[in-house]
Image (cartoon, helix red, strand yellow):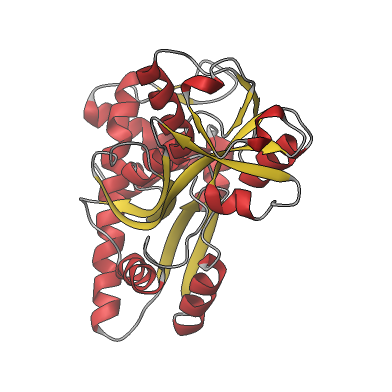
Amino acid sequence: MELRQLEYLVAVAEEASFTKAAARVHVAQPGVSAQVRRLERDLGEELLDRSGREVRLTEVGAAVLPYAHAALGAVAGARLAVDELTGLMRGHVAVGTVTSSPSLLPDLLADFHQDHPAVEITLSEANSDRLVEALRAGQLHMAFIGLAATTPAGIEIHVVADEPVVAAVSRGDAMAARKTITLAAMRDRPLISLPPGTGLRSRLDDACATAGFQPHIAFEASDPQVLAQLAARGLGVAILPESVARTHTRELRAIAITRPQIRGRLALAWRAEGPISPAARALISRARAVLPGPSGDPQPAA
């Protein structure tokens, strides 16, 4: 088993194509195919299903892939550790974020890039569940996620924001005169919420289940600002972080949710175990140092 074989397997799995994988690793397609076949012979099992239009992992291939990622990451980490000790800092840091990322994120990345111009930084956006999966698989080095009731297994976190979640309605809504409302009182109201897979939606669903009902979700959007705009037009009750509702005070009335209170938490997250490159470690350390915690200025939680 050779590292290049694992590299080619990862490329084919992620590109779902031998042609695209060959272009990615700058090797002729027959060379990529031959090396993957050799890896399959060494392991005694087929790792890729080549029968469809797209190449897909077999069950065995899916089991092998995380180990391939880990092996490649370990080698890259060893090389970068040597660079770090010789005064160099280079490599690649993959960052993920939910839509409502901290407002200081652009400054964080820009300052880090200024200090370490040889480090390539990429940023991608997804729901929290996808970001956690990518962290565990080693596809991301750090991510800003919305937290559910419990911290995901295998993940370390630094909480950036912790704030109440409110029910936001248009000022012409019958609920607008209220200061508080129980979750059960919204049982039959159309709700406007972040989609499944987000931390806030997970907390809402869990709270409703505890209260004995399933929420009626009329509208979903990944951007909390869109939820606020929909509620302002009278389309339902938006379930929002309090800080987001405060930015729409002219159009919306924010009502505190009681029994139970729901809180939204935004956190910096990274994988608890496994090798980590010096560049990624440096960015995570800087983020933990400069980003405010819950006691600082609140950031919208998702």
Expressed as whole percent of the image width and height from the top left, the position of residue 151 reads 28, 42
**Residue 260 in which image quadrant:** top left
Give the answer, above or below, for where 215 lies relative to 288: above
Please tell me which residue lies in front, 234 or 145: 234
Please tell me which residue lies in front, 42 or 10: 10
Is residue 25 among the parts visible in the rendering? yes
Expressed as whole percent of the image width and height from the top left, the position of residue 59 reads 33, 20
Give the answer, above or below, for where 271 lies relative to 34: below
Is residue 223 among the parts visible in the rendering? no
Residue appearing at x 73%, y 36% in the figure = 230
Point out the image quarter for the N terminus. Answer: top left
Horizontal side, residue 10 vs residue 281: left or right: right
Horizontal side, residue 112 vs residue 42: left or right: right
Residue appearing at x 44%, y 51% in the figure = 163
Expressed as whole percent of the image width and height from the top left, the position of residue 199 reads 43, 38
Please tell me which residue lies in front, 62 or 35: 62
Expressed as whole percent of the image width and height from the top left, the position of residue 266 reads 42, 51
Residue appearing at x 79%, y 35% in the figure = 233
Q: How many marks?
A: 0
**Which residue sits furthest bottom?**
87
Residue appearing at x 67%, y 47% in the figure = 225
Give the answer, above or below, for where 112 lies relative to 152: below
Please tell me which residue lies in front, 99 or 235: 235
Horizontal side, residue 144 vs residue 26: left or right: left
